[in-house]
Amino acid sequence: MQFEHDLDPSEPARAELIVSGRVQGVFYRQTIARAAEQGGLSGSAVNLPDGNVRVVFEGPAAAVFAAIEIARTGPPASVVADVRIEWSEPVGEQGFMTG
């Protein structure tokens, strides 16, 4: 796996994703929450009014990249059309929430 922005895989990272496609009503947020939990990540997965889902992952860069790969696929009933990623400095977020 190629690490973007020359991130050290063990260093903390934060990525905000806007995921478009058929990603609401198909257990997408639950799949993302499970991926975050398995990777020890904090953040959130929230439905947006426009039908997209906003996802935030924060934690070790290697785990963030692994979770992004899951976000690009989603659960079987989803159809992920696009994933836009914005990187920022970690803020020390704790826990993972869906909404």
Image: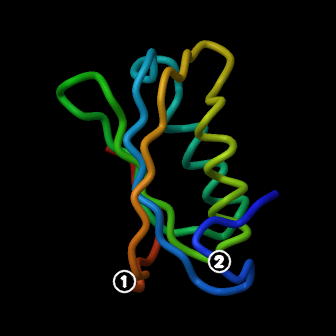
Q: Position of residue 65 (x, y in %)?
A: 67, 59
Q: Residue furthest left?
A: 49
Residue 35 vertical position relative to residue 77 in the rendered view, above or below: below
Kindly indicate the quadrant of the structure image that contains residue 30. top right
Out of 48 and 34, give the one closest to the viewer.
48
Q: Give the color scheme: rainbow, by chain, secondary structure or one colour.
A: rainbow
Kindly indicate the quadrant of the structure image that contains residue 49. top left
Q: Residue furthest right?
A: 1
> Which tag is nearer the camera, tag 1 or tag 2?
2
Residue 93 vertical position relative to residue 52 in the rendered view, above or below: below
Classed neighbour count for the residue bearing mark 1: other residues with Cα under 10 Å, few (<14), some (14–19), many (≥20): few
Q: Quadrant of the C terminus?
A: top left
Classed neighbour count for the residue bearing mark 2: other residues with Cα under 10 Å, few (<14), some (14–19), many (≥20): few
Q: Quadrant of the N terminus?
A: bottom right
Q: Which residue is mark 1?
A: 91
Q: Which residue lies at the image location 24% right of the left edge and 34% below the top edge?
A: 48
What amino acid is labelled 1 in the image? Val
Query: Does dot 2 land on a helix, a strand or a loop?
Result: helix
Q: Position of residue 21 (x, y in %)?
A: 43, 19
Q: Which dot marks residue 6? A: 2
Q: Position of residue 5 (x, y in %)?
A: 58, 72
Q: Which residue lies at the image location 39% right of the left edge and 22% below the top edge?
A: 24
| 35 horizontally vs 94: left or right | right
Q: Position of residue 19 (x, y in %)?
A: 42, 35
